[in-house]
Amino acid sequence: MSKRPRRNHSPAFKAKVALAAIRGDKTLVELAQQFDVYPNQITAWKSQLLDGAADGFGGERSEPSMPAVDVKTLHAKIGELTL
């Protein structure tokens, strides 16, 4: 039995499949057959869409966990240490 080659789906395709799953007209199995993807993948894309939907409406954005790094300062520090 040969393996299926790894496929990379476009964001537009993922959104289309996730919206079809949210709509609920068909079951996950029917959608999986229609779009030729696994049902678990559809569930993952659906949850990603629902989690990221608030960002589209200007939801609160979390601050990055790490502060921005000044590369020039770090290069200067490296230069000092090598001397």
Image: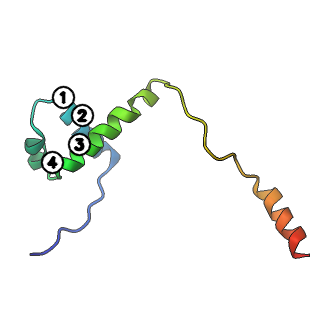
Asked if residue 81 lies left or right of residue 60, the reply is: right
| Quarter occupied by the N terminus | bottom left
x, y percent for residue 5: 22, 68
N-terminal of the pair, mark 4 or mark 2, is 2
Q: Does the residue at mark 2 contact the one at mark 1 (Cβ under 8 Å)? A: yes
Q: Name the residue: 54% across, 31% down.
A: 61
| Quarter occupied by the C terminus | bottom right
Q: Name the residue: 13% across, 41% down.
A: 28
How far apart in space, not on screen, are marks 3 and 1 (Cα)? 13 Å
Q: Name the residue: 34% across, 40% down.
A: 48
N-terminal of the pair, mark 2 or mark 3, is 2
**Closest to the observer, 54 or 14:** 54
x, y percent for residue 62: 56, 34
Give the residue pinned by disc 3: 43
Q: Amino acid at mark 3?
A: Thr
Give the residue pinned by disc 4: 35
Element type at marker 4? helix
x, y percent for residue 9: 29, 53
How far apart in space, not on screen, are marks 4 and 2 (Cα)? 12 Å
N-terminal of the pair, mark 4 or mark 1, is 1
Give the residue pinned by disc 2: 19
Element type at marker 3? helix
N-terminal of the pair, mark 3 or mark 1, is 1
